Image (cartoon, rainbow, N blue to C red):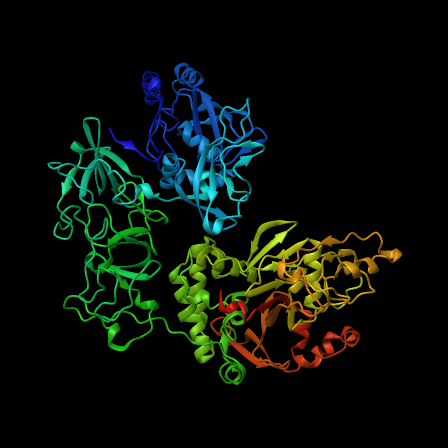
Amino acid sequence: MLRDLSSPGGWAGAGAQNKAEDTQNLLEDAPNSDGRGLECAAGAPTMSLPPSVGDGNCYYILTEGCAYGSKYFPPGSLCFCSERSYLRSFADRPSARFLKVVMLDEGSTVAVTVEILQPVRREVAALLLGIGGPSERLDSFLERLSLEAALQAGPGQKVTVEIERQHFPGVVRYVGSIHKSPLAALSPVFFGVELQGEGENRGRSDGSYRGTEYFKCKPGCGIFLPFSKIRFTPGPENEPGKQKPKVEAEEGVPVKVGDAVSFYVDEVLRKGIAMAVYREGSQWFVKVCPEEEGTTDIFREIPLDSVVKENLISQSVFPTFGSDVGLGHAKQPKRQASESGEEGESGNPPLEVNSMVQITLDKGNQVFGIIRWLGYLPQIKHKMAGVELDEDKGVTAGEWLGKYYFHCAPKRGLFVKLQSCQPDVRFQSSRGSDLNLVEDSEHEALPHAPVSFPPLRNEDAVSVLRGRMKGIQGHCNSCYMDAALFSLFSCTSVLDSMLFTPFTLCDRNVQEILREEIVNPLRKTGFVKARSVMHLREQLTEKGKCSSFTNAEKDPEEFLSLIMQKILGIEPLLKLQSGGHEGLDCYCYQIFMDKQEDLVVPDVQQLVEHSFLTYDQKLVEIPSCFIIQMPRFGKEYKMFSKIIPSLELDITDLLLDSPRECCVCGDVATLECSGCFKDKMFAPTGLKQFCSTCSKQVHSHYRRRTHKPTRLHVPEEFQCRSPQGSQRVPREKMELFAVLCIETSHYVSFVKYGPENEHWMFFDSMADRHGDENGFNIPTVTLCPEVAKYLDLPLAVLALEQPRDMDGVAKRLFCDAYMYMYQSNKMALYK
């Protein structure tokens, strides 16, 4: 009988064994509406027996959404029923398709079709119950390796925890419930972790929760988390040489770890790789990773006498394990790094953790990845590398023989001899003949490192970009993408990391198209063909699962969010705090604000300050790129008829916990007043903050006595200063580099290509057209120095300027602004 590990640990509760067998017999005789037995969703194997662990209840997770009356229970909801109720339901009505269950989250009793109920053990249900959202709960349940690790974890286990999208080391000190209800059938299980190293002082307790002490640690070092926020790493007691090895195949046992094997499932012959060989009592089992197409890392435990060994993997490389690549065979190039990682004959630099490498598998197939672990595995004399691959071509999530050496997504991990790894030549500088490595007798040159062209500035930008058939050629409603790409890459390098860096989710195919077919041609020749952008749009359609990206009109922020967040996986450009709560990260910042009667022709500085003050927002850190959407809705409604571009955006007073300057005397500010910000007595821009002395004087006026200033955090080095004003508060400013504009439904862009006010160019991807239906668009880039004339006008004069009378294309910059793009030259060096 095959035991499936998709619900970790199988069944528990020896006391309920006879009752369980009776229940299984009942279910096997109970067909559902289409004549099948009760099956699990999402392709999971049939598991008709409810898990029973002695508390008299059967627990389930919903694999699909369920509506009951006016309520809707999404996938991932947990529920239970008593074993007695379960047996009674199927004994009375063997063909019953519904089961009455109680929803654990809110206590309702509902009737649920059995086809969407996935049985889970009580321990698993308790772990899942600690996860707040049903969607995340279901994802965590399907992530079987992480769930298995959580079930086996206990106090003393070393872990890495996720706090506000950052990861910190810690040690598990407590596993269990932290708030019990006498009415609840099951209490959620949390992990109490003591944070260490960089994680110190990022916790929220000293090991206590709501007055109850669960463990002891320093204040600010304790935190309670669900298992979904934890990565379980092996502790010192599990390191090679210090642990008691698992029971493995003894002499005479025909199958060893790494062997290719065959086995039968439902009378169908399958193939797989032996992951572990062990004994339970008197019987031997083999843990197999199936190789069938479509597998989702469901490991199977199969009796040894049901497994047939195949002689498909050479035994000459690893006499014990029979595999050169920890479950995949790799050829060794003639020129290779030594086992110690020192520079080899090829002159390659030594390989270490986080080195980007390439590995040649059987039949010459190459895979690419990043080294996440280096060391020695049990019973293997060679130095090994644990590699996280770019694609799903591995066989593990960082586990070897039941122990995790690193963590990655399922089917992305591979263990290989270090000498079988070569530096990823796509990310190496060209070194002449050293790139022409040969393998066996085939003299095939490996691909060269990606070529990089710098952004165009000053006269170079004019000579390369100006003219007809310049810029990015528009085609089939692509203007939103054309304008955004031209703005982000033609004259600045602030987001060039998108072109080269292998981010967490980085799709290298999309990255290569963006770099090789769009950005490099734009910077080299000044022109990108429409078919190159269509190639990118086709990839966005596939990855974004949205069929309209190749033909429909979109918004720039929709395109930027998709490619940055879901396809490349870069970190959010902005990290915000609102109302004291962090974690409000985003890629584009939308300005929301009430209509301000005194703001007739505002500049960007004023709009950003009003928006931040209205919603009590602060920047957690200085962004390298700040993309700001103007307060307009749809294609027609604009809150302001004109907006003045702020060539510099001063974000000093928008930063969280940054030193601030008193707007009256220039000393270090200790108080901020939102009421004074709206007072016409003060300057129209700049948040209003004061030192203690000036605050008392300003608020002694009868009109301002009702104001309620809030206290600012003052960095320690600015708290004691003498004499007054001797140390000026540093200003943090960002530079405007591009503006996207929209008139009716067509996007264009203005790009600042040099330091002077008149250094502006205007780009329209569909400025002209050749031919009719079978013709093509003619993109055009023109210089627009007339913009400087209006930037220098006094505000009162500019407000009276009629758009139709403005020179050249300046009207579109001042009246049609949709998105402003700012950069920090300082932070761009680090991000």
Q: Nearer the viewer, residue 501 or 671?
A: 671
Q: Please give the name of the residue rendered at 22% of the width and 51% of the height, measured from the top-left corner.
A: 328
Q: Please give the name of the residue rendered at 54% of the width and 78% of the height, measured from the top-left corner.
A: 780
Q: Quadrant of the N terminus?
A: top left
Q: Is residue 306 left or right of residue 749?
A: left
Residue furthest to the right in view is 702
Q: Is residue 823 left or right of residue 676?
A: left
Q: Please give the name of the residue rendered at 44% of the width and 39% of the height, measured from the top-left corner.
A: 227
Q: Is residue 297 visible?
A: no
Q: Is residue 468 left or right of residue 447?
A: right
Q: Nearer the viewer, residue 686 or 380?
A: 380
Q: Is residue 759 above or below residue 276?
A: below
From the top left corner, tell me how far across and down residue 245 is, in percent: 24, 39
From the top left corner, tell me how far across and down residue 712 is, in percent: 69, 55
Q: Is residue 97 visible?
A: yes
Q: Please give the name of the residue rendered at 18% of the width and 40% of the height, measured from the top-left corner.
A: 262
Give the quarter of the image for residue 298.
top left
Give the quarter of the image for residue 426.
bottom left
Q: Is residue 711 above or below residue 174?
A: below
Residue furthest to the front in view is 722
From the top left corner, tell me how far across and down residue 696 is, in percent: 81, 57
Q: Nearer the viewer, residue 477 or 114?
A: 114
From the top left corner, tell me how far across and down residue 240 is, in percent: 26, 45
- The total of numbered circles placed on residues is 0
Q: Is residue 560 above or below residue 140?
A: below
